[in-house]
């Protein structure tokens, strides 16, 4: 649990750098265990004809895998890969994910470069934890052809459908007004029943502000018995 809490602190410090952390946290609800079909329909009501992908676990009920997925789903850092698989990192000093996203679509070559050693996540490694609605693993060949890929997280517990619609529209407008040949891949970060979790179960979250940063403590996972 210590490791989980540490990563959560890093996540929320990043949020606080945007100056909107209080507003963001105000919309947070305890994550509930969801079904993929319902989530797919929910997303389709926001962005019709666009698929959403899901995170998978190798072993149902494995708490470490489940917590890692939850943290991946909460991540606000821009996850961007070149078509050849290398992860690209932001060269600027701004920590707010929104600013980083805007700069990716404005002057990409000036703002992004292959990540240095220590940030060696490849697109194939990331894809290995994803699946589609039917549970099929995702390969690069399943994705649209593009020079770059942005994997954008979304979930139900961090805000309303209206907020999700606004975020998606903002992102698609950035793409529309850019010359960057990029595909945006939407990935759901909600807890899934198929991970071995109790249907309609909740994960209690407790936020605390210390020294200008926010930390989060996770309660007990609703593991299916």
Image (tube, rainbow, N blue to C red):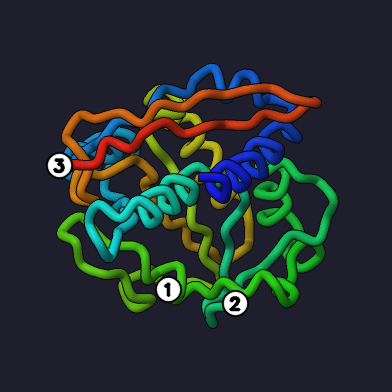
- The tag on residue 145 is 1
In the rendered image, residue 97, in percent from the top left (x then y), is placed at 66, 44
At 44% from the left and 76% from the top, the residue drawn is 124
Q: Nearer the viewer, residue 214 or 83?
A: 214
Res 15 quadrant in image: top right
Judge from the rendering whether residue 121 lies leftward or rightward of residue 54; answer left or right: right
Q: Is residue 53 visible?
A: no
Q: Which of marks 1 and 3 is in front?
A: 3
Q: Disc 3 to disc 2, how far (Cα)?
A: 40 Å
Q: Is residue 164 among what the camera can see?
A: yes
Residue 63 is left or right of residue 38, and the answer is right
Whole-percent x, y for residue 68 in the image: 45, 53
Mark 3 or mark 2, earlier in chain: 2
**Nearer mark to the viewer, of 3 and 2:** 3
Would you name the residue on which mark 2 appears?
86
Q: Nearer the viewer, residue 96 or 6?
A: 6
Horizontal and vertical percent position of residue 35: 19, 40
Q: Which of 102 and 217 is in front in this view?
A: 217
Residue at the bottom extreme, as displayed:
84
**Residue placed under numbered mark 3 in the picture:** 225
**Along the viewing direction, whichever of 198 and 144 lies nearer the viewer:** 198
| Residue furthest to the right | 93
Q: Is mark 3 on a helix, strand or loop?
A: loop
CA gap between label 1 and label 3 equals 43 Å
Disc 1, disc 2: CB below 8 Å? no
């Amino acid at each position: 649990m210590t490791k989980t809490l540490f990563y959560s602190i890093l996540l929320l410090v990043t949020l606080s750098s945007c100056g909107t952390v209080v507003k963001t946290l105000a919309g947070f609800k305890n994550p509930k265990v969801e079904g993929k079909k319902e989530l797919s329909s929910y997303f389709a009501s926001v962005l019709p004809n666009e698929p959403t992908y899901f995170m998978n676990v190798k072993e149902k009920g494995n708490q470490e895998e489940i917590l890692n997925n939850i943290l991946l789903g909460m991540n606000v850092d821009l996850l961007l890969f070149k078509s050849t698989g290398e992860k690209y990192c932001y060269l600027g000093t701004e920590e707010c994910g929104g600013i980083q996203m805007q700069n990716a679509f404005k002057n990409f070559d000036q703002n992004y470069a292959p990540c240095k050693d220590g940030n060696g996540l490849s697109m194939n490694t990331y894809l290995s934890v994803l699946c589609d609605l039917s549970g099929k693993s995702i390969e690069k060949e399943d994705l649209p052809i593009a020079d770059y890929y942005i994997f954008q997280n979304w979930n139900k517990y961090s805000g309303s459908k209206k907020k999700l619609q606004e975020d998606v529209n903002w992102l698609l407008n950035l793409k529309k007004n850019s010359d960057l040949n990029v595909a945006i891949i939407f990935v759901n970060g909600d807890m899934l029943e198929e991970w071995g979790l109790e249907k309609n179960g909740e994960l209690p979250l407790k936020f605390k502000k210390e020294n200008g940063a926010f930390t989060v403590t996770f309660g007990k996972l609703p593991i299916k018995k």
